């Protein structure tokens, strides 16, 4: 028995010594045998690696989105007639005798440069109002090298949007996406012509949705993004990873004129409604009731003994306006328009803007702690006159 045990111990010792030598000097022999015994798991991994090599584009590339949307993004150049600065008597022979050619002459100068997006095969282009504001001539340069003069179909300064049209064939219209389905963290691409260097694509994520207190436009519902947006990008496209239009890049927050990672885009949901009204009616028609609302701050709630935080408090009422005629008074708190609750001042503006002029709509309000309901005949909002 002892002899058998010694024989077993010697055999085990030699076997372990051989195993150590083989694993040290020829490890591939061990791996080959091990892989053959577990062929199912490792062969499937090898197949995945081979299939990955066969994929031309992985999720780390957004070339398809860029290639799909870039042809629809155009460069917009404008110029203004400088004849207003020319002297009214520059062609008078008597004045020419004394001043010769020293009087200012009629000329044109570049006014601004920006971007736009082709949204229909009929040549409709959406851009920012501030890109073409005051322009006497608008030139559009397409990504395929073609150029065309554009005409203004209509503008909406209160959302900073404008609709242009060019007369060319075979135009590459972008596909409109669904900004209401976008979420914070989604990857987006910004396409435009920053600083006039040429068409450029930058990438980022959606940083916030529904920004409405930026102080840029009357009606604000911005998509905020950290994709690099610079001067010249205004009017350009913000697209999703499939190349669908999510918004029009409109403004940036900057201390030096360059990108600081805070850009604002007008969502395509706003663009659709504005564009359809401009094309069909020539203007954007909005409701108006003639009130000056304010948000309910904690200090205001304490001062007026207001228990609710939602709604909008009326600071002023336009005399003989729709709200005045319906009996709404300063100090009232508007809580509902129809059956829709009012969240704050901005929400109230949006809800009233969607109402049709001449429609009679019930408004719910709180007055000195009591709930009231009044019917308001909605008026038409007129654009504010530009300051001279």
Image (spheres, rainbow, N blue to C red):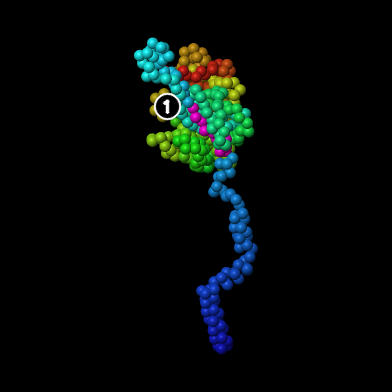
Magenta span main SS? strand
| Image quadrant in which you'd find residue 357 | top right
The residue range painted magenta reads 69-78
* Mark 1 element type: helix
Q: Is residue 35 magenta?
A: no
Rendered location of residue 48, percent (x, y): 61, 57
Q: Please report the residue visible at 41 percent of the width from the left and 18 percent of the height from the top.
A: 86
* Disc 1: which residue: 301
Disc 1 crowd, CA 10 A, few/some/many (<14, 14-19, 20+)? some
Observer-nearest residue: 332 or 290? Answer: 290
Observer-nearest residue: 230 or 45? Answer: 230
| Image quadrant in which you'd find residue 281 | top right
Q: Quadrant of the N terminus?
A: bottom right
The residue furthest top is: 94
The residue furthest left is: 98
Residue 68 seen by the camera: yes
Rendered location of residue 261, percent (x, y): 44, 39
User: Is 262 situated above or below 28?
Assistant: above
Q: Please report the residue visible at 60 percent of the width from the left and 50 percent of the height from the top.
A: 56
């Amino acid at each position: 028995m002892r002899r058998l045990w010694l024989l077993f111990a010697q055999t085990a010792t030699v076997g372990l010594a051989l195993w150590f030598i083989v694993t040290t000097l020829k490890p591939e022999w061990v791996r080959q045998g091990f892989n053959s015994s577990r062929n199912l798991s490792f062969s499937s991994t090898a197949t995945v690696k081979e299939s990955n090599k066969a994929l031309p584009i992985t999720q780390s590339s957004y070339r398809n989105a860029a290639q799909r949307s870039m042809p629809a993004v155009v460069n917009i150049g404008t110029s203004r007639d400088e004849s207003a600065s020319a002297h009214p008597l520059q062609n008078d022979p008597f004045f020419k005798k004394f001043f010769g050619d020293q009087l200012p002459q009629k000329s044109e100068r570049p006014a601004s440069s920006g971007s736009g997006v082709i949204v229909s095969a009929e040549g409709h282009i959406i851009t920012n109002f501030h890109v073409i504001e005051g322009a006497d001539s608008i030139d559009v340069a397409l990504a395929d090298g073609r150029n065309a003069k554009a005409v203004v179909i209509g503008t909406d300064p209160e959302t900073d949007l404008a609709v242009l049209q060019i007369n060319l064939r075979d135009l590459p219209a972008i596909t409109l996406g669904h900004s209401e389905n976008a979420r914070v963290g989604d990857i987006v691409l910004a396409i435009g012509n920053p600083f006039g260097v040429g068409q450029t694509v930058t990438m980022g994520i959606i940083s916030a949705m529904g920004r409405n207190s930026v102080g840029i436009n009357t009606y604000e519902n911005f998509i905020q993004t950290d994709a690099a947006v610079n001067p010249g990008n205004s009017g350009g496209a913000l697209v999703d990873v499939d190349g669908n239009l999510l918004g029009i890049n409109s403004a940036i927050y900057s201390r030096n004129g360059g990108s600081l990672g805070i850009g604002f885009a007008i969502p395509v949901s706003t663009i659709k409604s504005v564009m359809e009204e401009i094309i069909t009616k020539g203007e954007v028609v909005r409701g108006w009731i003639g009130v000056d609302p304010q948000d309910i701050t904690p200090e205001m709630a304490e001062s007026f003994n207001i228990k609710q935080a939602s709604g909008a408090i009326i600071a002023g009422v336009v005399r003989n306006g729709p709200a005045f005629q319906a009996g709404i008074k300063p100090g009232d708190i508007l809580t509902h328009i129809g059956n829709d609750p009012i969240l704050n001042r901005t929400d109230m503006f949006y809800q009233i803007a969607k109402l049709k002029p001449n429609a009679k709509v019930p408004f719910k309000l709180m007055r000195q702690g009591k709930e009231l309901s009044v019917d308001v005949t909605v008026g038409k909002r007129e654009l504010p006159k530009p300051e001279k």
